[in-house]
Image (cartoon, rainbow, N blue to C red):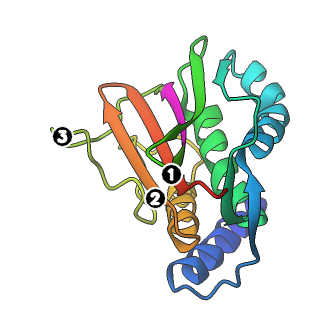
Amino acid sequence: KSQRLKQLTEDLVEASKISSGNVSLDMHKIDLVELLYQTGGEFNERFEAGNLTIVTKIPKEPILIWADGRHLYRAIENLYTNAAKYALEKTRVYVELCEEDGEAVFSIKNISKKPVYADEGGRNDLTERFVRGEVSRTTDGSGLGLSIAKNLTVLMGGKFDIVVDGDLFTAIIRFPIQK
């Protein structure tokens, strides 16, 4: 319990710094393709342990965006962690990266273990601090991961969205493509 409390405290401090804009950025051209392959490789064992199959649709050629590599990794890592924790066992997690209207569009989709709250338009407030998709709160999440991912993305000039359609959960990050 003390380790969980320590992690919660660290996440809360980080979330507060990010939402206040009190974070220094080291912006560079980042190859999002390479970052996604690395992140996916790091999560293979976690997905296998949860009986999840990852299905990737990522181009082989680089897609460059302007971002802070460390903070972008944290945002994407939070989305992979979310899928690993909350996806229904023996289902697939879809990871996709494409170019759309001058933007790099990354999405990660999974079927949720438990019903996820959303309004009639598929919108929700899951990116607010301490808000979690499953109302019963029986899992060990803090409710900060999606908030941190969204705030980091926006801080770096990207867009972040979540769409819930029944049990299908999709997180989407968009950044302008750099040439």
The label on residue 159 is 2
Q: Amino acid at mark 3?
A: Gly
Along the horizontal axis of the image, is 165 left or right of 4?
Answer: left
According to the picture, the residue beneath numbered tag 1 turns out to be 174
**How many neighbours does mark 1 have within 10 angstroms: few (below 14), some (14-19), or many (20 or more)?**
many
Q: Are marks 3 and 2 in contact (CB under 8 Å)?
A: no
**Of the residues under marks 3 and 2, which one precedes in the sequence?**
3
Residue at 69% over, 22% down? 50
First in sequence: mark 1 vs mark 2: 2
Give the overall secondary structure of the magenta segment: strand
The answer to whether 32 appears left or right of 102 in the picture is right
In-front residue for pair 69/5: 69
Describe the element under mark 2 as helix, strand or loop. strand
Asked if labels 2 and 1 touch by Cβ distance under 8 angstroms, the answer is yes
Residue picked out by circle 3: 121
What segment is highlighted magenta in the picture? 105-110
